[in-house]
Amino acid sequence: MNWYSLSDLAILRELGSSLRQIRLNRNQSQQAVAEAAGIDRATLSQIEHGRPTSLLTFVQLLRTLEQLDLLDTLVTKAEINPLALARLAKKQRRNASPASSTPPPPAEW
């Protein structure tokens, strides 16, 4: 599916439809899932029909439906390329310049 070609509301409808299908595949009623997630059944119905919701409610539903693994693709950890790390270490200044041991010459006025 080309997510970029969809409007934000169309994406919400797709997500809601997917949540509904997951719920039905688990043979659970809206009421049972809503109670387990700590939300109202009407709220679940609205979400399944593509209405906007909070991220907290979305996470509660994913947890209830045992689908938190779907979040793995959203959370990325920055990995530093070993070559880039070596270049950064090489560029870092290692020591401060030594203090000058000879005093500056007196200024002429």
Image: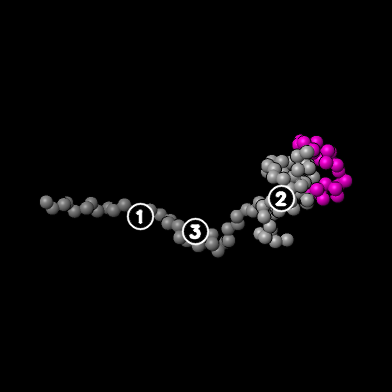
Three-letter residue code for mark 2 = Leu
User: Is-magenta flag for residue 23?
Assistant: yes
Task: State which mark lies toward you, 2 or 3.
Answer: 2
Task: State which mark lies toward you, 3 or 1.
Answer: 3
Identify residue for label 3.
Answer: 89
Q: Is residue 21 left or right of residue 97?
A: right
Residue in front for this viewpoint, 4 or 51: 51
- Asked whether the residues under the numbered discs 2 and 3 touch, taking CB atoms below 8 Å apart as contact, a structural biologist would say no
Quadrant into which the N terminus falls = bottom right
View extreme (right): residue: 27
Its colouring scheme is: one colour
Identify residue for label 1.
Answer: 97
Q: What's the residue at 84%, 38% (across, down)? A: 32
The mark nearer the N terminus, 2 or 1, is: 2
72 w.r.t. 83: above or below: above
Residue in front for this viewpoint, 95 or 69: 69
Region rendered in magenta: 19-41
Three-letter residue code for mark 3 = Ala
Residue 2 drawn at (x, y percent): 70, 61
77 w.r.t. 64: above or below: below
Calculate the distance from the C-alpha at mark 2 to the C-alpha at mark 3: 45 Å
Question: Callout 2: 10 Å neighbours few (<14), some, many (20+)?
Answer: some
The mark nearer the N terminus, 2 or 3, is: 2
Q: Is residue 36 left or right of residue 3?
A: right
Residue 12 is marked as: 2
Task: State which mark lies toward you, 2 or 1.
Answer: 2
Q: What's the residue at 85%, 42% (across, down)? A: 29
User: Is-magenta flag for residue 74?
Assistant: no
Residue 80 is marked as: none
